[in-house]
Image (spheres, rainbow, N blue to C red):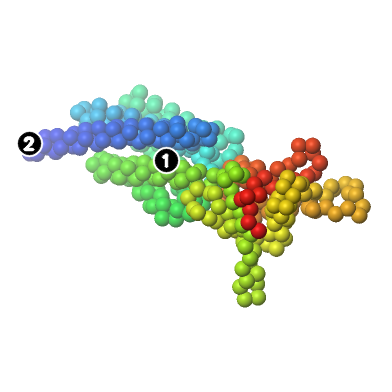
């Protein structure tokens, strides 16, 4: 009987030792890889979301070292091991929550909360309330549910992360990845709740599965972000070509703008209203016929009598830009800083003398009417 117990103990120790080294090596590699993506791309975008996600994965790597260290310790040291697991779990959750404000697409129901300047305080206070009792239990050496507080904090984190991941992938039209992310979050939630049962072997298996899945989701998220940057970058004026097309369908006339110059696709088509189509075509005709001639916007105050103005107000330009962006990227799938302002700079040039004059920036050779 003693021999059987000894074999079981040795088998358990070997399992924890293998799991610890696996967790340390895999998560350390993932940390370096995520940080490398940020160094080459995210740093230039001043985006630190990937840094926080990388740090969250690094916490798992440190947790793996703890597993290795305690693998050969007697069972009475288990509460101490559980305590260190909880500490690294808390830091992992904190770093994930700190990454959320950097996500480009956030659910409307959560955006007002996550974008608050007090977000770090909102998530920091529960973190401290969970961390301090856990550290106290480690120092005092008392047994108990040292995992319990980090489980609650992890569940909160996973709810936020799941909603944000679903929104991010769906906005990028990666529905399969959105579904997989929810499945991954579900498995992780199950593993967190399973911690309370105290089944060490099964918990180790759950941990290996959900940590691997989450790391892959983080990489998929990073790659989808890189893909979006490459495909949705607004080309410079000299690389953008436009053509005005009209198609008749039964009793309706479709007015399409063909655009070439975006990476990832040879051409894109945007359907415009008659007013928007004619406005942009007036810019194109002026560019083709008169070169650098300007179109004039009607002033709001004291417009000249008996004078023809090309554009009623600047809102016409804004509505045109919004229609183009909705057609190119989908309604709600673009942002002001990354899409609207660059497209405005590519298409239009304002008079430096503040004369309420505007003209098309695209070269005449790139325009087909």
| Residue 145, horizontal then vertical, whole percent | 35, 36
Q: Badge 2: few (under 14), some or many (20 or more) residues near its Cα, within 10 Å?
A: few
Query: Between 247 and 117, which is closer to the camera in this rendering?
Result: 247
The reply to whether residue 178 is visible in this rendering is yes
**Quadrant housing the N terminus:** top left
Name the disc covering residue 271, or none: none
Secondary structure found at label 2: helix
Instruction: Examine the rendered structure and indicate whether residue 247 appears above or below residue 78.
Output: below
Q: Mark 2 points at which residue?
A: 3
Query: Between 287 and 169, which is closer to the camera in this rendering?
Result: 287
Q: Badge 1: few (under 14), some or many (20 or more) residues near its Cα, within 10 Å?
A: many
Instruction: Examine the rendered structure and indicate whether residue 251 appears above or below residue 159.
Output: below
**Left or right: 163 with respect to 203?**
right
Residue displayed at 42% across by 44% down: 223
Residue displayed at 59% across by 51% down: 241
User: Image quarter for residue 358?
Assistant: top right
The furthest residue to the right: 305
Q: Distance between the residues labelled 2 and 1?
A: 39 Å
| Residue 210, horizontal then vertical, whole percent | 33, 44
Nearer to us: label 2 or label 1: 1
Q: Mark 1 points at which residue?
A: 154
| Residue 40, horizontal then vertical, whole percent | 45, 33
The furthest residue to the top: 139
The reply to whether residue 158 is visible in this rendering is no
Residue displayed at 66% across by 58% down: 369
**Left or right: 125 with respect to 219?**
right
């Amino acid at each position: 009987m003693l021999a059987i117990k000894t074999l079981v103990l040795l088998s358990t120790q070997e399992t924890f030792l293998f799991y610890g080294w696996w967790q340390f090596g895999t998560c350390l590699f993932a940390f370096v890889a995520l940080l490398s993506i940020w160094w080459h791309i995210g740093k230039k975008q001043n985006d630190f979301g990937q840094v926080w996600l990388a740090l969250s994965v690094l916490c798992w790597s440190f947790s793996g070292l703890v597993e290795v260290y305690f693998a050969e310790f007697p069972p009475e040291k288990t509460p101490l091991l559980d305590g260190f697991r909880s500490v690294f779990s808390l830091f992992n959750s904190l770093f994930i929550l700190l990454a959320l404000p950097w996500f480009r697409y956030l659910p409307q129901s959560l955006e007002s909360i996550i974008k608050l300047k007090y977000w770090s305080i909102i998530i920091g206070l529960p973190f401290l309330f969970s961390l301090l009792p856990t550290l106290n239990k480690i120092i005092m050496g008392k047994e108990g549910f040292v995992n319990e507080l980090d489980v609650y904090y992890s569940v909160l984190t996973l709810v936020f992360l799941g909603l944000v991941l679903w929104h991010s992938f769906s906005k990028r039209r990666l529905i399969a990845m959105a579904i997989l992310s929810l499945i991954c979050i579900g498995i992780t939630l199950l593993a967190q709740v399973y911690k309370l049962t105290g089944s060490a072997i099964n918990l180790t298996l759950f941990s290996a599965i959900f940590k691997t899945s989450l790391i892959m989701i983080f990489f998929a998220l990073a790659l989808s972000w890189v893909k979006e940057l490459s495909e949705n970058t607004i080309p410079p004026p000299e690389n953008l070509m436009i053509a005005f097309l009209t198609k008749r369908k039964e009793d309706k006339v479709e007015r399409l703008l063909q655009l070439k110059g975006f990476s990832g696709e040879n051409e894109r088509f945007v359907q415009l209203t008659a007013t928007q189509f004619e406005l942009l075509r007036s810019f194109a005709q002026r560019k083709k016929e008169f070169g650098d001639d300007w179109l004039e916007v009607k002033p709001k105050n004291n417009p000249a009598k008996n004078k023809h103005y090309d554009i009623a107000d600047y809102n016409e330009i804004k509505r045109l830009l919004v229609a183009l962006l909705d057609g190119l990227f989908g309604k709600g799938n673009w942002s002001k800083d990354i899409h609207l302002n660059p497209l405005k700079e590519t298409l239009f040039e304002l008079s430096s003398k503040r004369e309420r004059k505007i003209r098309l920036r695209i070269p005449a050779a790139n325009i087909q009417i």
